[in-house]
Image: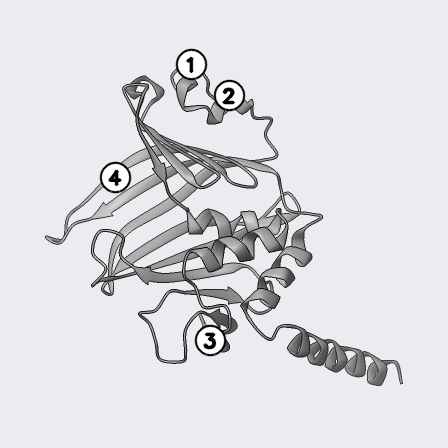
Amino acid sequence: MHRLILILVLLTSNVVQAQTIRNGEDLLRAMHERYKDSWYQTVTFTQKSTTYKPDGTSSAETWYEAVSLPGRLRIDIGPATDGRGYIFSNGTVSVIKENKLVETHKSINMLLVLGFDVYRQDPEATIKVVKGEGYDLSKLREDLWGGKPAYVFGAEKGDLKSKQFWVAKDTLLFLREIEPAHDDASKVDDIRFIRYQPLAGAWIAAGVEVYSEGKKVFSEDYSDIQANVKLDPAVFDPEKFGTTHWEK
């Protein structure tokens, strides 16, 4: 009898989920609802960044990243003495060279939005950003990724060129983004979050792979991952890039 009740509960749960997630907006709200009380507020990590060249060779460098959710990401490229990096802050990116701000322009980091922000900020804010970036939230379907069910929103089945995101059906974690390449819209970038691991009651993908036209061109491997680190707001101030760092 108890087993029968359990089966009925599971079936009912699956039906409710199927009825609730009808489009991309529903999915973004469900992602937020799943982790809103457990997702970390800040995270820092060391990143091995590898660039794969057409001739088959590769080069790597170390980046240091700090994230404060929602909306803020700092990247230090190489050692602090180089004074080189980027700060993404609520829709803009600041370019730093030799510890000096050299450029600021509008830029939405969608990996930050759908890999992290979605779980912390008001889902309506996420929906507004995603729509503003040209993703069709009316298109939602199911597919398989890594042999497991996934939601895909933004494109019809067989379309691997339109802007789209893939999300794990069971965990509601971000898996994959496909979009036209920023430097050449005739090409397609396919960016994948890999090696998810538990972190402070939530999750983090400890690796990222970037493919262009089907070939891997870039990868990220994270180490020394620390959640809920106390970060001074000045860490994300471009004018204080050279004088403000975080605990590692």
* Category of crowding for the residue at label 1, using alpha-carbon neighbours closer than 10 angstroms: few (below 14), some (14–19), many (at least 20): few
Foreground label between 1 and 4: 1
Q: Are marks 3 and 2 in contact (CB under 8 Å)?
A: no
Q: Name the mark on residue 60.
A: 4
Q: CA distance from mark 3 to mark 4?
A: 32 Å
Under tag 1, what secondary structure?
A: loop
Percent across and percent down for residue 32 are 63, 55
Foreground label between 1 and 2: 2
Pointer 1 or 2: first along the chain: 2
Q: Which residue is label 2 attached to?
A: 234
- Residue reaching furthest to the top: 243
Q: Looking at the image, which residue is at 48% across and 60% down?
A: 131
Pointer 3 or 4: first along the chain: 4
Residue type at mark 2 is Ala
Q: Name the mark on residue 144.
A: 3
Under tag 2, what secondary structure?
A: helix
Q: CA distance from mark 1 to mark 2?
A: 9 Å
Q: Are marks 3 and 4 in contact (CB under 8 Å)?
A: no
Q: Nearer the viewer, residue 96 or 229?
A: 96
Q: Is residue 84 left or right of residue 112?
A: left
Pointer 1 or 3: first along the chain: 3
Q: CA distance from mark 1 to mark 4?
A: 26 Å
Q: Is residue 209 left or right of residue 141?
A: left
Q: Are marks 1 and 2 in contact (CB under 8 Å)?
A: yes
Percent across and percent down for residue 108 are 41, 46
Q: Name the mark on residue 243.
A: 1
Q: Are marks 2 and 4 in contact (CB under 8 Å)?
A: no
